[in-house]
Image (cartoon, coloured by chain):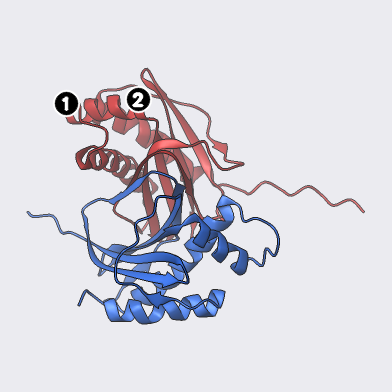
Amino acid sequence: MQTAPAKPPQVDAKLIVPFVNAVRHVLRTMAGWESNVERPRLKQKQGPEYDYSGIIAFSGTLIGTVVVSFHRDLAVKLVAAFVGCELPADTADFADAIGELANLIVGAAKAELGVNASISVPTVIMGKGHIVARPSDIPCIVVPCKTDAGEFAVEVSIKAA
Amino acid sequence: MQFIEQEIRRLTPEIWDAMLHLALDPESEVPKTQSRVVSACVYITGAWNGAVALSCDVAFASEAAAIMFNLADATPTTADMQDALGELTNMIGGNVKALLPEPCHLSLPSAVEGADYSVRILRSKVVTQVPFRCGNRSMSVSLLEREERAN
């Protein structure tokens, strides 16, 4: 007997659009960069690996995590545009800048979502080739972002509690 | 004595015993490992803000995943290890949350695996760090509290 193929998990687009808007807004206002956000897609497998990731968790009426991940070259340029000077990429100040960027993006998205949820302080992972896992029971939507300096990703794994 | 250190020393071995049937013993120093490391974190927001983090080497995480998911001869994947560590961290976080002022919310866990990475939780300080040993393997549980911004 054949079994029907598993249906892909349903994702509420209303939860994703605010992150698309937030990326554009934050990069334009905080770094003076224009960004091109490509069509969000369902993440099917683990990876790719990044060098810097800012992780922020939702709790309350929304639960899950959002991860903003960068490769080193782009991170260095973006942080320089954000803080106004180039920072050594292995310092706490650099990590703080990555965390603040993640916080601004997720904070702006949360404001547009208009939900009564809390977001955590950002956690920043620094290290080549690390892999960030998210809750396995929440679909992960990748929001691919392109800039003139390179690409980065916002991975959204949230759902109503 | 660190903030709720005694409680973490008590409840973590209880969770290990209940979930994995493994005995955890107190360790005097936080382990330094050269191998790949798995870290998991749950965040607490509300009347108290911070995070509970658990970190161990891949061999320990693999053993935990094999037991938790009854994988028998199969080799646990990175996702299995991250799920296992996430679940254990979630249980520790749930117990820690019960000791904190109400109301507090607990996030779902996030986990990271890699060979050479550092974890920095912004605007937070480590208030408690408790190392454990399980045979020849080691792990640590950390509690980080959000630092209030000066006005």
Q: Which mark is residue A85?
A: 1
Could you tell me which secondary element the residue under label 2 belongs to? helix
Tell me if residue A2 comes above or below residue B132 in the rendering. above
Tell me if residue A30 comes above or below residue B46 in the rendering. above
Q: Is residue A13 left or right of residue A73?
A: right
Instruction: Name which residue lies at 48% across and 71% down.
Output: B135
Tell me if residue B13 comes above or below residue A11 in the rendering. below
> Three-letter amino acid code at disc 2?
Asp
- Colour assigned to chain A in the rendering is red
Q: Chain of mark 1?
A: A
Q: Chain of mark 2?
A: A
Q: Nearer the viewer, residue B27 or B107?
A: B27
Q: Position of residue A54 (x, y in %)?
A: 35, 43
Instruction: Name which residue lies at 34% across and 21% down.
Output: A34
- Colour assigned to chain B in the rendering is blue
Q: Position of residue B62 (x, y in %)?
A: 56, 59
Q: Which residue is mark 2?
A: A73
Q: Is residue B68 left or right of residue A3?
A: left
Which label's residue is closer to the chain start, 2 or 1? 2
